[in-house]
Amino acid sequence: MNLDGRLESALDSALSDEAIGTAPPRLVEAVRYAVFPGGARVRPRLCLSVAAACGESDPSLSDAAAAAVELLHCASLVHDDMPAFDGAAVRRGKASVHARFGEALALLAGDALIVCAFQTLAKGAGQSPGRLANVLSVVGRGVGMPAGIVAGQAWECEQNVPLKDYQRAKTGALFAAATMGGAAAAGDDPEPWRMLGESIGEAYQVADDLLDANGDPEIIGKPVGRDVALDRPSAVRELGQNESALALRRLVEQAIESVPPCQGQTSLRKLIELESEHFMRLALSCRAAA
């Protein structure tokens, strides 16, 4: 089974009738609506790719780690779209969860997805229980404090926001959880994989900032112009369009070079280069057309 097939199978299992089907029906519907159909699934695919490059010996734990990362990402999008933060009515080309189900169910759906992510990890570690603590640690660090996605969201509530800290927490942290979680699931030391995740995460955020400034909401599937409207920090607002574009290219190059020595190093570098081309091309083409 290819990586995409493995991931969708793991997500289907995490949100199956057996796992959550007895919950209140509208909550079940809201949770599944938040996850399916998915976006690019960049983070969990990266998690599986790193595990494979490290010579994974327990695919069930790698699948669980990847699914957990995606469930946490989906939870963050549900909460991020709510009126208390972005107030976005559209996500992935369809109504956001709160727009479709109301604020109360959206809040509960996001909370449920967070819990489900860690339940999925626990269930997936049956063959490698000795690796679970390491995987839980790196994934948990990517979402909590002091510098996970919760902290990244909280920076938006501060008066003075260091751009680097904000982007590293809001976006880079979960990418780092993906790369480090993949390594830990494969039984490797996760720390050498931190820079790869943080570099890709920062690149992805710069690309998102460029799309917010120049993108077409019909193409990217969500509202644009939100950074200015909500007075949020962004690479474009701080560095300008040209410097942001240069920074994006540098970060992708840094990510490719930062892949640690492993049996799949060459193939993983090529994969990252190919994957990065997509969001770079979209971000830079929108900038050129603006």
Image (tube, grey):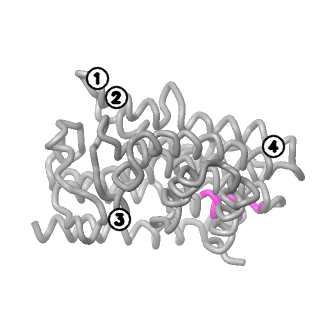
Q: Which residue is mark 4?
A: 131
Kindly state the secondary structure of the residue where label 1 is placed: loop
Mark 3 or mark 2: name the one nearer the start of the chain: 3
Q: Residues within 10 Å of mark 2 (few under 14, many from 20)?
A: many
Task: Please tell me whether mark 3 or mark 2 is closer to you in this view.
Answer: 3
Q: Disc 1 or 3, which lies upstream in sequence?
A: 3
Dot 4 alpha-carbon crowd within 10 angstroms: few under 14, some 14 to 19, many 20 or more: some
Query: What is the three-letter code of the residue carrying label 1?
Result: Glu
Question: How much space separates mark 2 and mark 4, taking CA atoms?
Answer: 32 Å
Determine if the magenta segment contains residue 222: no
Q: Is residue 76 left or right of residue 214?
A: right
Spatial distance from mark 1 to mark 4, Cα to Cα?
37 Å
Residue depicted at 52% across the width and 46% down the height: 109
Q: Which of the two discs, 1 and 3, sits closer to the camera?
A: 3
Looking at the rendered image, the disc whose residue lies closer to the viewer, 1 or 4, is: 1
What number is the disc on residue 94? 3
Whole-number angstrom distance, CA of label 3 to CA of label 2: 27 Å
Alpha carbon separation for disc pair 1 and 3? 30 Å
Q: CA distance from mark 2 to mark 1?
A: 5 Å
Mark 1 sits on what residue? 158
Residue 38 drawn above or below residue 84 = below
**Residue sitting at 58 percent across and 46 percent down?**
113
Label 4 element class: helix
Structural crowding at the residue carrying mark 3, measured as other residues with C-alpha within 10 Å and reported as few (<14), some (14–19) or many (≥20): few
